[in-house]
Amino acid sequence: MRRKIWVLLMTSFASGQQTPEARLLEGNRLLEEGEYARAETVYRALSGNTSHAALTAKSNLCVVLQRQARYDEASGCTRELLAELTATGIGTRRFRVNILNNYAAQLLRHQDTLPEAEATILEAIAISAVPPSLSRAETAALRYTLALIRARQGRTGEAAEQFREVLKIQREELGPEHSGVAATLNNLGQIEIRRGNYIKAETLVREALDIWTRRSGRFHPHIAVACNNLAQIYRLSGRRAEAEPFFRQAIQALERTTGPYHPDLAIVLSNFAGYMIDIGRLGTALALYQRALEAQSRSGGNTADLQRKIAGVTAHLRRQTADLLVNAQAADYPGQSGSVH
C-alpha cells in the first residue's frame, strides 16, 4: 500500500499537477505576500464547484478583490457567496461565520454602510456562540472586526478595549509574530494618534512595523500602512525631519505592490503633501496632490476633497507669485523723497 501511494504522489509531482488543496495553499501564500493579481488567478481557477477548496477559494477571491480596491466586485462576490450558501445549504457554520466577517469588513468603507456592517458582524458573533463554539482565535477575528466598526463609529474607548482583548488572545493562540498581532497593534496605535498620545502610538505602530517587516520584508501593503502612520505621528508631534523617510517608504511599498492607482496610495500621497505644506514646499505639495488625485480617480474613489486641496494650494501659489512680482517692482522703482514737478 505504501508503495502505491508513493508512486501516485511521484506521478502527480512529475506531471506538474497539484491537488486543489495544494493550489489553494499556493494562492494563500501569494495573498499573504501581497501578490494579489497572481492570487486572483489561482482562486478563480479553483472556484468552479462546491468542494471545500473551491468554497474557500471563492471566499479568498472576495478578499483579493477588496485588497485590489475593486470594492464593488468584492462586495458582489461576497453577497453571491452568501446567497449560494443560503440557497444550497453547503458550507459549514464556521465557513458562513467567516464569510459574514469578511462582508462586515468590506462594509467599513462608507459611513452610510456602518449600520449594515454592525448588524452583519453581530449576526456572525451570534452564530459563532451556538455550541460547539469556535476557537478562541476565530472568535477574536470577529471581535477584531467589531472593534474596527466601533472605531469608525467614533466609539474609540470601546474599540480600544476590544482591540486589547483581541491582542491578548492573538498572542496566546497565534504567537507574537503573527500578522494579525501586528494589525491589532497598528489599530491601537491609530486610536492613540486620534487621542494625541503620540509616544504611546509610536511604540504600538513601531512594534507592528517590526513584525510585518520580519514577515514580509520592506515592500508590502502592510508595511505601507505602518510607515504612513509613523510618518503622521512624527508630523503631528513636531518631529518633522523623521516623517519624510517613512512617507517615502510607504509610497514605494504601495507602488511596488498595488500599483500607481490605488486609493491607499492616494491617502499616503495626500498626507505627504500636507507634510510638504507644513515645511513650506508648496510646489512639491501640489505635485503630490495631483498624483493622489489621479490615483483616486483611476480607482473610482471620491475626488472632491483632493480637488479642494489642489485649488487651495494653487491659489496660495498664485498669491505668492503675485507678491514676488510686487516686491520685484518695488525694488526696481524705489520711492523718492521731495516733490515731483
Image: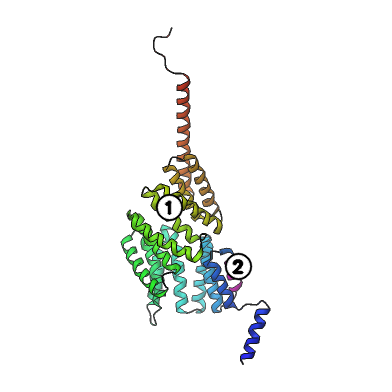
Mark 2 — residue?
Answer: 41
In the displayed orientation, state which residue is furthest to the left. Answer: 157
Between circles 1 and 2, the one closer to the viewer is: 1
Q: Is residue 46 magenta?
A: yes
Magenta portion: prevailing SS class: helix
Which secondary structure, mark 2? helix
The percent coordinates of residue 233 (x first, y second) are: 39, 53
Which secondary structure, mark 1? helix
Q: How is the image coloured?
A: rainbow
Q: Is residue 302 visible?
A: no
> In this rendering, would 296 be left or right of 189?
right
Q: Residues within 10 Å of mark 2 (few under 14, many from 20)?
A: few
Q: Amino acid at mark 1?
A: Ala
- Label 1 vs 2, first from the N-terminus: 2
Q: Which residues are magenta?
A: 38-48
Q: Which residue is found at the position 37% from the left and 77% from the top?
A: 129
In the displayed orientation, state which residue is furthest to the right. Answer: 15
Q: Which residue is found at the position 47% from the left and 25% from the top?
A: 328
Number of marks present in the image shown: 2
Mark 1 — residue?
Answer: 231
